[in-house]
Image (spheres, grey):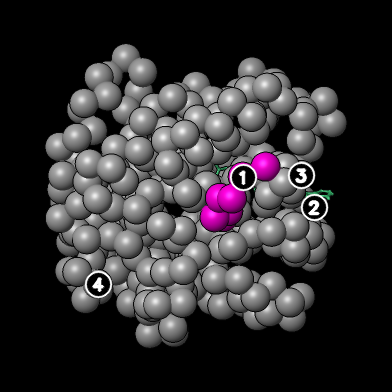
């Protein structure tokens, strides 16, 4: 099933993001986690793509399993950075052969050891070019990434919004946002998007904070800002893992409740492969 149809049928569409186990860990280690996620009845589950394609086969294998064996719709993330044209087509063919219908099409970040990676040498310089290629080739439902606070590489927020509009115009069915911690930024983003004529559904990415250090690292990479309230919370609870987890769940629940009250299209929970905490959040917010 193509996920885009879900947005016409229900509000909010509740989805989870999971990541494949590391290559030195058996793939089967994710099955128990998937059992628990299935019990939470998500509308779909997306599976991330390891930086530079490091776990590409696992993304497809897990997304197929979620769909075929767990009976939950899935979406495979795909980044084209560093891939040859043949590799890109082979990945798309493999998704198609595995009956995957939904793809989150991304450009990707520069390889870790090449911070100055020259994207002009990439097969596709921007996600919009990859999306155009996918559109010309397969009949996938295509999602793309959106950045509520602007993408870190783009110097002007206005330009980033215009690039987003270009991306949507080449054939995006819905958008999934980068994580953010201040809902006002999301509502502001939606207003700007509407002004530009971006009319597709936008599902906000929400990440519960489980560890203070981890969130500082993640936000330093993706550029999401930390509201003062959250910094105070991390200072207060950061020294104790369980207290931090509970406070993180409370914050994410509060964010989600407010988003749902404001009629958002979806909630995309960045689960960090933690079904227990995801369950608590859904229970707190009435989404289970
Ligand atoms: C929801 C979500 C899921 C993600 N999942 C993964 C994952 O599974 N694996 C992974 O490795 N990474 C993932 N990422 C991270 C993503 O790969 C990086 O943020 C990457 O740097 C940008 O990818 P993009 O598809 O958004 O790129 P693009 O949309 O191509 O944008 C990249 C930059 O180029 C600029 N730009 C776009 N078009 C133009 C133009 N015409 N002229 C000039 N500049 C332009 C944009 O403003 C932006 O600064 C995810 C991000 C999000 C938000």
Q: Work out whether 76 lies above or below 176.
A: above
> How far, Cα to Cα, is label 1 from label 2?
33 Å
Q: Is residue 197 left or right of residue 23?
A: right
For the residue with label 4, is its CB less than 8 Å from the closest atom of ligand 1?
Answer: no
Q: Which residue is mark 2?
A: 155
Q: Which residue is mark 1?
A: 138
Residue at image point 65% right, 75% down: 199
Q: Quadrant of the N terminus?
A: bottom left
User: Residue visible at 50% across and 38% down?
Assistant: 96
Find residue 259 and report its horizontal and vertical position in percent.
42, 77
The residue positioned farthest toward the top in the image shown: 24
Where residue 157 appears, x then y in whole percent? 75, 62
Of callouts 3 and 4, the N-terminal one: 3
> The C terminus lies in which quarter of the figure?
bottom left
Q: Nearer the viewer, residue 23 or 255?
A: 23
Mark positioned earlier in the residue sequence (4 or 2): 2
Q: What range is drawn magenta here?
A: 137-143
Earlier in the chain: of badge 1 and badge 3, it is: 3
Q: Is residue 192 visible?
A: no
Q: Where's residue 104, x and y in %?
A: 54, 48
Closer to the eye: label 1 or 2: 1
Is residue 138 shown in magenta? yes
Residues at marks 3 and 4, CA–CA distance in whole angstroms: 36 Å
> Dot 4 corresponds to which residue?
287
Q: Are marks 1 and 2 in contact (CB under 8 Å)?
A: no
- Disc 4, SS: loop
* Lateral position of residue 262 relative to residue 81, left or right: left
263 is higher (above) or lower (below) than 225: below
Q: Is residue 63 left or right of residue 202?
A: left
Where residue 171 sits, quadrant-wise, is bottom right
Instruction: Give the residue at mark 3.
Output: 129
């Amino acid at each position: 099933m193509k996920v885009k149809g879900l947005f016409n049928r229900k509000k909010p569409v509740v989805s989870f993001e999971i990541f494949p186990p590391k290559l030195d860990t058996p793939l089967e280690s994710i099955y128990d986690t998937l059992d628990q996620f299935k019990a939470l009845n998500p509308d779909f589950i997306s599976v991330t793509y390891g930086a530079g394609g490091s776990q590409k086969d696992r993304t497809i294998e897990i997304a197929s399993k979620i769909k075929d064996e767990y009976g939950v719709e899935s979406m495979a993330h795909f980044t084209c950075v560093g891939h040859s044209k043949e590799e890109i087509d082979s990945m798309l063919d493999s998704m198609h052969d595995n009956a995957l219908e939904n793809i989150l099409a991304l450009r990707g970040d520069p390889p870790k050891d090449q911070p100055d990676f020259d994207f002009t040498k990439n097969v596709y310089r921007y996600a919009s070019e990859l999306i155009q290629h996918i559109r010309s080739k397969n009949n996938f439902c295509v999602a793309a990434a959106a950045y509520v606070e602007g993408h870190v590489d783009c110097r002007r927020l206005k330009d980033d919004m215009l690039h987003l509009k270009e991306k949507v115009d080449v054939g995006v069915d819905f958008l999934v946002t980068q994580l953010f911690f201040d809902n006002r930024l999301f509502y502001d983003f939606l207003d700007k998007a509407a002004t530009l004529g971006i009319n597709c559904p936008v599902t906000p990415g929400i990440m519960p904070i489980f560890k203070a250090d981890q969130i500082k690292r993640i936000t330093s990479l993706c550029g999401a800002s930390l509201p003062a309230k959250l910094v105070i919370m991390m200072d207060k609870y950061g020294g104790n893992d369980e207290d931090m987890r509970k406070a993180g769940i409370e914050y994410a629940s509060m964010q989600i409740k407010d988003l749902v009250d404001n009629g958002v299209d979806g909630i995309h929970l960045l689960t960090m492969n933690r079904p227990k905490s995801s369950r608590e959040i859904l229970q707190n917010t009435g989404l289970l």
